[in-house]
Structures are given as structure tokens and as C-alpha cells.
Image (spheres, grey):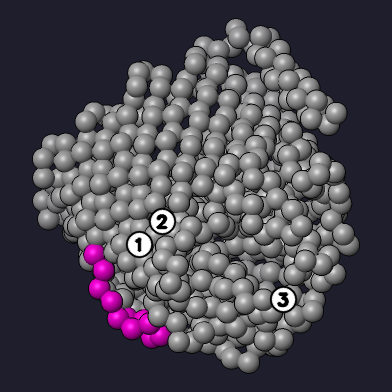
């Protein structure tokens, strides 16, 4: 009966969308102009390049797309990127892991400042909680580069790189939004920015809150998480700019996040209902300063310094507080050797120190690096990028890595590329030093660094004037891959012999007319590990081998409505209660006036039972995703 109701609800929503469209067809000719075909990207090569000239799988999400598609968080936006996934353990007090090309080893930056950390109970390879990224009202665009980028960006850039670029203040603008919804949900925020002469500022604040959480189990029953699963997250982002001339100036950034709430470490612990409720508090205080020169010239450069501070307390059965302080100095200078040849040179120094109040060992490390990349257009439609990087890590030793990438541009709308990157990834402080007072989590100071190679190839093209498509293949092999292994009564960080990962992503986007767009993507990932236990390569069951994304969007001068679907199939029975799933999200925005906009977001519209994070007990997902929930509100722009 519930499945029938879900189908009727979905059909009713689609009917409302269609009904709304007929009343405003007359306004189609006044719809917003399409975005320029030639988007400029920076992150892939550390230089300004047209997307079609970039030898990588690149997606750019603009602030206009964030607004039009009703994204409430950065992770909302990332979940629509082909080949990207965000793994959620069900409750926001746990971290949200970003995966690119099936890999958690991803470098995440805010305005070019690395925000990955080395500390925290990750039980995996991710080094960032995506909950801590800035509010979307502060974001100008998000650049997502899938595939190896370790030469330019160092450790963790195995799956790719994400750069969240905040707005640079120009004219005076501001927004205020208020939203309320299911389970006591609140979404409150404001942003404001402006510029006087050569001095500018941009500030944004956001509060997200929920009183409790519900989920649907594999039997089809909707349940409430036991205990008090309430949480509150406050986030503040500030950007100050001072121009000295038109081409050089100073930028100061500050990002703060405070997430506090109650949670359970899954529904079960070792087969029994989990009674371990924890009060968790996670704070980030990140500050950076950057001086850049010759901004729009080929010989541009910058020097920046930043400090990231993370505090994590888990006041349950594993009482204690952990904190990490990272600070770094980085510099880059570009040299225009000719009209078709540019050399990028850079230096990096990063220092990380952790302190665990209830842990027997504290730890620290530093890494010194130098890198060079040559970008050469050796023919009108061909580009060759070659790079080399040298790292000196205080715990993992020294290593030289390299990269080669070639790009062929067939037209202004199509290109093909092939890239290779070698990898040197040092263990994190978590891997090396973590040990709780119960000896339940055990780091390993004898870990070896991960090394290996990452390959990717792709082809982007236009089928016709309204249809764009892309295909990407990827392959990686890592030696001495690091994992956290479950030994029954404790977890232990260890090296395994090898890890192989291969897969592909297919994506297509079609503009039906000026009102309707549709898109779809399919990603296949296969991960095999060799633990040197005599069994050879064994498939890792923690990953969903097949992942689907699809959407339909209606837009005119008043309405912006998106219906998005995501799903997985072939999930291992040993790790997931639901072996196949499909869930729908709906985002709708209606513009009442030039200043006022109403919005509504419905997550898990069809109330599916599913999990994104592996773990199953008695046929039930240990980390079930939240059920159907809605948030409605209004936004005022000035």
C-alpha cells in the first residue's frame, strides 16, 4: 500500500510541474540566456584554461546553477556531478565523505586553500567532512576535477580535486533566507557583500538544525532513530579583499563551522542494538591570507599562508577531545616561455599536529614539496602537459612523482584526453597515531606510504545543437594501500599489498527546448584488493558497483523545478540491507517578485529504504539514510 502511495505522490508532483509550465509558456522567450559554452577552469592545471582545452574530466557548478537548482548545501550540488558520490552515515553529526571516480582520496580546497585534515575517526580514506564546507550563499562556483592530480596537489589527489571558490565582492548585494520543515528542521541564513573603492568584503552565515531523524528499514517500516538525534550546525564565512592595483592585491579568508548534536554509532554494535549514544561537537576555525599579482597575465603568481584548526569531541563511551592544527605556506609563479608554452612552478610547506586528550600518543608531521608543470600547445588543437613533483615527508620519506596529459580539441564543443599520474600518499595522523583509551582504535606508526599510478581517458562531444555527452574511463593501482581493518574487538590501521580500481562514467545532457532540460549519468566502479593472504585479488564489497543519476528540470522567468533521481545496484549482501535502491529529490523555486523567492525541497520523495555507507546487521542497514523530509521557505535578495 505504501509503494502505491509513493507512486501516486510522485505522479502528483510531476502533474503539478506540468500544470505550472502551461501558465507561463508566454514568458519562454524572456528566459535567462544560456551560459557561455567556453567555461574557464583553473583547478585542473593551476592556470586559466577553457574547459575544452583541459586534459581532464571537469565539471563546473556556477552560483547561478546553485540557485536555479535549489541546492541547499555543497553536497547537494556534488551529488549531481557525474562520477561523484557523497557517502552519508545517516546522521549529520557523522562525517560526509566525498568520492570521485570511486575513490575517497580527494583533495578539497576553499579558494585554493587545502581544507583536508588528518585527524578523526574516519575508518576509511577520506580526510574531510563535507559538512564543514562554506554556505552555498557564499559560493561563486565549484570546480570538480576527476582523476589523478597528485603532481600538482599532492597526497589525497588520487580520485581528484574539488575547489570551492567563494564570491569576490564587487557591487553591494545580499540575501536572507528562512526555511522550516520535517522533524523540526530549520535552515536560516544570510549573506552580504560589497566594495568601496579598492576594499571589499563578503560575509555569510547559516544555521541548520533538526530535532530528530526518521528512516525506513528494509521491511518497509518507518522508524525514528532511538534517543535524541538532534543536531545544530552554525557556519560563518568571511572574505576581505584589498586591491593595490587592478592586477594585484590581498585577500583574507575566515571560515568557521560548529556542529553539535547527539548520535548513535549506527543502529547496531556487533549484532546488538546500539546503546552507545554520544554527544558530538565538531568545530573548524580556518583562516588564510593570500597576495597575488599579475592576475590576468600569463606570468601571474601568488603567495599564501593559512591555518586550519579542527576540534572534535565525542562525549560517549569513548570520552575525550581531539584537535588538529595545520598550517601551510604556498607560493606559485607562472612563466610565459612563449605564446604557446607556460611553465608553472610552486613551493609548499605543510605542518600538521594532533592532540588527543584521551589517547596515549600525540603526533605531528611536516611535508615540503616543489612542483613544476609545463603546459605546451604544440599544435593548434593539441596540448601537452608534463609535470614533476618532489615531496619530503617527515614520516614517510621522500618521493618524486610525475604526470603526463595530452588533450586534442576537435571543435569548440568537443575534446579527447589521456592522462597519467603517479601517486605518493603518506599516512595521515589518524592512520599513524590514533588510539582511544579503550584500545578499540589502533593506529600504526610503522605504516608505509601508498604509491602507484592513476590513468584516465575521456571524450566530450556534442551529438547535436541540443545534446552534450561525455565518456570517461579510469584505472588506478596502489601499492601498500592503507585500510582500517576490523579484527572483531578492535580496529587496526594496516597496509595491504595492492588495491586496483577501474571504472567508467557515461553522461548525457539534452535541452528539449527553452523550458525543459534532462540529463542522466551512469558510473561503474570495481575495486579489487590483494591482502597477500593467499586469496589473490578479491572484490571489495563496500562499494556500489553501479551508480545512476538522472534529472529533469523545468525553468522559466518564474519557476525553477528540478526532479533528481539517484540509485545504486549490485550492492553486496554482506554489506547492505538493500542491494538495489532508487531515491528521488525535488527542488522547486518560484519568483514572486524581483526580490522575493519561495522554495521547497523534498528529499527522498519516494521514501526509499537505502544506505550509502556499508554496514549490515540481521539484514538491516546499520547506517540507514533519512526518510522523506521536506523543507519550505522564502529568500529575499537585495
Circle 2 SS class:
strand
Q: Where is residue 380 in the image (x, y as percent from the top left)?
A: 13, 37
What residue is shown with label 1?
477
Pair 3/2: label in front? 2
Q: What stretch is highlighted in magenta?
A: 392-402
Identified at 58% across, 41% down, the residue is 569
What residue is shown with label 3?
313
User: In the displayed image of the protein, which residue is found farthest to the front?
Assistant: 534
Q: Gap between marks 3 and 2, in whole Å?
A: 34 Å
**Circle 2/circle 1 CB separation < 8 Å:** yes
Q: Position of residue 361 (x, y in %)?
A: 59, 91
What residue is shown with label 2?
501
Q: Gap between marks 2 and 1, in whole Å?
A: 6 Å
Identified at 65% across, 21% down, the residue is 558
Where does the N terminus fall, quadrant-wise?
top right
Q: Position of residue 40 (x, y in %)?
A: 35, 41
**Circle 1/circle 3 CB separation < 8 Å:** no
Question: Sequence-wise, which precedes: disc 1 or disc 3?
Answer: 3
**Circle 3/circle 2 CB separation < 8 Å:** no
Identified at 57% across, 79% down, the residue is 492
Identified at 53% across, 42% down, the residue is 547
Whether residue 469 sits left or right of residue 124 in the image: it is: left
Amino acid at each position: 500500500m505504501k509503494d502505491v502511495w509513493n507512486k501516486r505522490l510522485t505522479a502528483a508532483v510531476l502533474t503539478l510541474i506540468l500544470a505550472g509550465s502551461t501558465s507561463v509558456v508566454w514568458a519562454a522567450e524572456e528566459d535567462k540566456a544560456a551560459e557561455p559554452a567556453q567555461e574557464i577552469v583553473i583547478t585542473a592545471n593551476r592556470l586559466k584554461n577553457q574547459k575544452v582545452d583541459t586534459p581532464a574530466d571537469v565539471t563546473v557548478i556556477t552560483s547561478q546553477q546553485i540557485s536555479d537548482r535549489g541546492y541547499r548545501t555543497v553536497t547537494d550540488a556534488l551529488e549531481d556531478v557525474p562520477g561523484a558520490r557523497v557517502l552519508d552515515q545517516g546522521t549529520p553529526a557523522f562525517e560526509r565523505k566525498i568520492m570521485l571516480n570511486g575513490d575517497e582520496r580527494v583533495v578539497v580546497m576553499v579558494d585554493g586553500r587545502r581544507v583536508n585534515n588528518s585527524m578523526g575517526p574516519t575508518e576509511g580514506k577520506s580526510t574531510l567532512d563535507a559538512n564543514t564546507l562554506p554556505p552555498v550563499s557564499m559560493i561563486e562556483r565549484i570546480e570538480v576535477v576527476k582523476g589523478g592530480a597528485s603532481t600538482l596537489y599532492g597526497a589525497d589527489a588520487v580520485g581528484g580535486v574539488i575547489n570551492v571558490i567563494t564570491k569576490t565582492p564587487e557591487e553591494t548585494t545580499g540575501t536572507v533566507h528562512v526555511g522550516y520543515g520535517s522533524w523540526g528542521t530549520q535552515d536560516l541564513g544570510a549573506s552580504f557583500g560589497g566594495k568601496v573603492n579598492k576594499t571589499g568584503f563578503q560575509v555569510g552565515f547559516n544555521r541548520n538544525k533538526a530535532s530528530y531523524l526518521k528512516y525506513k528499514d528494509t521491511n518497509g517500516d518507518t522508524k525514528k532513530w532511538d534517543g535524541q538525534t538532534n543536531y545544530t550546525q552554525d557556519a560563518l564565512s568571511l572574505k576581505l579583499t584589498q586591491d593595490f592595483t587592478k592586477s594585484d592585491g590581498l585577500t583574507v579568508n575566515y571560515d568557521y563551522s560548529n556542529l553539535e548534536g547527539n548520535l548513535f554509532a549506527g543502529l547496531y554494535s556487533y549484532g546488538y542494538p546500539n546503546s552507545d549514544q554520544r554527544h558530538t561537537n565538531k568545530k573548524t576555525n580556518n583562516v588564510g591570507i593570500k597576495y597575488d599579482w599579475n592576475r590576468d597575465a600569463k606570468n601571474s603568481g601568488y603567495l599564501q599562508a593559512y591555518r586550519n584548526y579542527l576540534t572534535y569531541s565525542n562525549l560517549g563511551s569513548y570520552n575525550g577531545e581531539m584537535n588538529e592544527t595545520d598550517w601551510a605556506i604556498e607560493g606559485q609563479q607562472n612563466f610565459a616561455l612563449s605564446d604557446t608554452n607556460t611553465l608553472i612552478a610552486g613551493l609548499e610547506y605543510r605542518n600538521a599536529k594532533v592532540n588527543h586528550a584521551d589517547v596515549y600518543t600525540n603526533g605531528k608531521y611536516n611535508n615540503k614539496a616543489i612542483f613544476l608543470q609545463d603546459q605546451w600547445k604544440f599544435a593548434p588543437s593539441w596540448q601537452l602537459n608534463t609535470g614533476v613533483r618532489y615531496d619530503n615527508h617527515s614520516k614517510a620519506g621522500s618521493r618524486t612523482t610525475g604526470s603526463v596529459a595530452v588533450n586534442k580539441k576537435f571543435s569548440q564543443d568537443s575534446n579527447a584526453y589521456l592522462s597519467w599520474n603517479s601517486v605518493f600518499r603518506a599516512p595521515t595522523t589518524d592512520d599513524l597515531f590514533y588510539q582511544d583509551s579503550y584500545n578499540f582504535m589502533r593506529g600504526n606508526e610503522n605504516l608505509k606510504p601508498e604509491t602507484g599510478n592513476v590513468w584516465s581517458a575521456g571524450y566530450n562531444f556534442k551529438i547535436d545543437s541540443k545534446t552534450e555527452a561525455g565518456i570517461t574511463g579510469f584505472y588506478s593501482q596502489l601499492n601498500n594501500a592503507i585500510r582500517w581493518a576490523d579484527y572483531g574487538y578492535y580496529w587496526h590501521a594496516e597496509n595491504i599489498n595492492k588495491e586496483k580500481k577501474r571504472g567508467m562514467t557515461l553522461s548525457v545532457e539534452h535541452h528539449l527546448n527553452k523550458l525543459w532540460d534532462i540529463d542522466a549519468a551512469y558510473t561503474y566502479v570495481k575495486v579489487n584488493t590483494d591482502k597477500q593472504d593467499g586469496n589473490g585479488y578479491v572484490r571489495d564489497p563496500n562499494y556500489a558497483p553501479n551508480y545512476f543519476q538522472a534529472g529533469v528540470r523545468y525553468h522559466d522567468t518564474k519557476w525553477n523545478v528540478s526532479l533528481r533521481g539517484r540509485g545504486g545496484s549490485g550492492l553486496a549482501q554482506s554489506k547492505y540491507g538493500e542491494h538495489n535502491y532508487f531515491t528521488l529529490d525535488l527542488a522547486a523555486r518560484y519568483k514572486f517578485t524581483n526580490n522575493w523567492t519561495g522554495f521547497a525541497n523534498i528529499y527522498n520523495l519516494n521514501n526509499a529504504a537505502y544506505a550509502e555507507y556499508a554496514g549490515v546487521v540481521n539484514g538491516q542497514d546499520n547506517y540507514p539514510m533519512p526518510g522523506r523530509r521536506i523543507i519550505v521557505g522564502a529568500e529575499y535578495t537585495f
